[in-house]
Amino acid sequence: MSLSGLAVFAAVYFVFVITPGPGMAAMIARGLGTGTRGWLPYGLGFMVGDMTWFTIAATGLAALAHQFAYAFMAVKFAGCAYLIYLAWKIWNAPIQTGEITSITTATDAWPSFIGALTLCLGNPKVIVFFISIMPLVVDVAQVNFTSYFAMLLVMAPFSIMLSFSMLYLAKRARTVFTSKTALRRINRGSAGLMASAATLIAFKG
């Protein structure tokens, strides 16, 4: 793959990553409810999820993925269940003014990673991009090991940087409000947003 072709792929992927969708809504809701705790494994989960779908598309396994549609459906609902669980934790979290409430179980490394991974694998937006849109940008028939790993290197930083940025900005937005009433509304609003993202993913596609 030429440098210009790699640049086009990077630009299209960047636009895809920053486009609003259920994953973005879940990030904002998590940032409002729990701040930046667990941001690195959370971002890595999205990164691995994107790379999994990219590998499926690049290696021509899309038809195989369709044959295992029920398995991917199970992954999708597992991700939705995680979002509902996190929404419930945020909704019921005790209010502490001046700081983000600690919700340790939901923000531990493995729950953060697995939750983001399953969310990404079941997100219709991600599936549509890698299975339908990406092949229009990249000639998958011409992808070799060199270009494959070059594209993985291009993809790697985006999800991690976006995850941290969205969680941090949401956390900063929350610090504007200091009263317990306002913080309770933010908690419940973010919980509702997260539950809505889960519902959208579950019943779309």
Image (cartoon, rainbow, N blue to C red):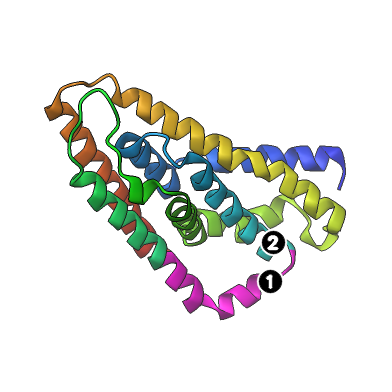
Observer-side mark, 2 or 1, equals 2
Residue 134: image location, x then y, percent: 66, 53
Span of residues in magenta = 59-76
Q: Is residue 151 left or right of residue 87?
A: right
| Residue type of the residue flagged with mark 1 | Leu
Element at label 1? loop
| Residue type of the residue flagged with mark 2 | Thr
Image position of 142 with respect to 176: above or below: below
Query: What residue occupies the far left of the structure in this picture?
Result: 181
Which residue does the image show at 25% across and 45% down from the upper left?
Answer: 90
Cα gap from disc 2 to disc 1, whole angstroms: 8 Å
Image position of 152 with respect to 122: above or below: above
Q: Is residue 85 magenta?
A: no
- Residue beneath label 2, please? 55
- Residue beneath label 1, please? 61
Dominant SS of magenta comes to helix
Disc marking residue 194: none
Image position of 152 with respect to 114: above or below: above
Which callout, 2 or 1, points at the residue further toward the start of the chain?
Answer: 2
Query: What residue occupies the far bottom of the structure in this picture?
Result: 67
Q: Is residue 91 left or right of residue 26?
A: left
Which residue does the image show at 28% across and 52% down from the upper left?
Answer: 195
Q: Is residue 192 left or right of residue 56?
A: left
Residue 20: image location, x then y, percent: 45, 41
